[in-house]
Image: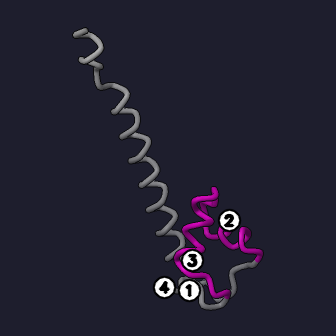
């Protein structure tokens, strides 16, 4: 799905930029060597960035909770 028609950025390229560390629409555009033109895509990219941050936070929380699980098999030996 195209997110930015002006620069032909699709959801995969935006997600790749977010995965590489871009956290804002401006950072996504910089990663692709362009600038915002009409601005209609900015709310969508902003929402995608928020979703990406939330998914990363959930992953970190799950990893932290996994470390809290006691190793009963080791203690029982």
Give SS at disc 4.
loop
Question: Mark 1 — residue?
Answer: 40
Q: Is residue 21 left or right of residue 68?
A: right
Decide if residue 13 is on the left or right side of residue 29.
left
3D distance between C-alphas at marks 4 and 1: 15 Å
Q: Which residue is mark 4?
A: 1
Up/down of 35 relative to 5, above or below: above
Q: Residues within 10 Å of mark 3 (few under 14, many from 20)?
A: some
* Residue interval drawn in magenta: 7-33
Label annotation for residue 27: 2
Residue found at x 25% / y 9%: 77
- Magenta segment: does it hold 77? no
Nearer the observer: mark 4 or 1; the answer is: 4
Q: CA distance from mark 1 to mark 2?
A: 16 Å
User: Marks 3 and 4, how far apart in space?
Assistant: 15 Å
Could you give the CA–CA distance between mark 4 and mark 2, rounded to whole angstroms?
20 Å
Q: What's the residue at 77%, 75% (across, down)?
A: 33
Label 3 or label 4, whichever comes before in sequence order: 4
Residue 3 point in image, percent of width and height: 54, 83
Q: Which one is in front in this view, the residue at disc 1 or the one at disc 2?
A: 2
From the image, tell me which residue sits under label 3.
Answer: 42
Q: Nearer the viewer, residue 46 or 70?
A: 70
Q: Is residue 8 magenta?
A: yes
Label placed on residue 19: none
The structure residue drawn at horizontal position 69% and vertical position 80%, both measured from the top left corner, is: 36
Secondary structure category for the residue under label 3: helix
Whether residue 36 sits left or right of residue 13 in the image: it is right
Colour scheme of the picture: one colour
């Amino acid at each position: 799905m195209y997110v930015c028609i002006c620069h032909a950025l699709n959801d995969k390229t935006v997600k790749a930029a977010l995965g590489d560390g871009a956290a804002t629409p401006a950072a996504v555009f910089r990663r692709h060597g362009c600038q915002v033109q009409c601005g209609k895509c900015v709310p969508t990219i902003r929402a995608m960035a928020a979703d990406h941050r939330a998914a990363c936070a959930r992953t970190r929380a799950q990893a932290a909770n996994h470390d809290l699980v006691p190793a009963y098999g080791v203690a029982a030996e």
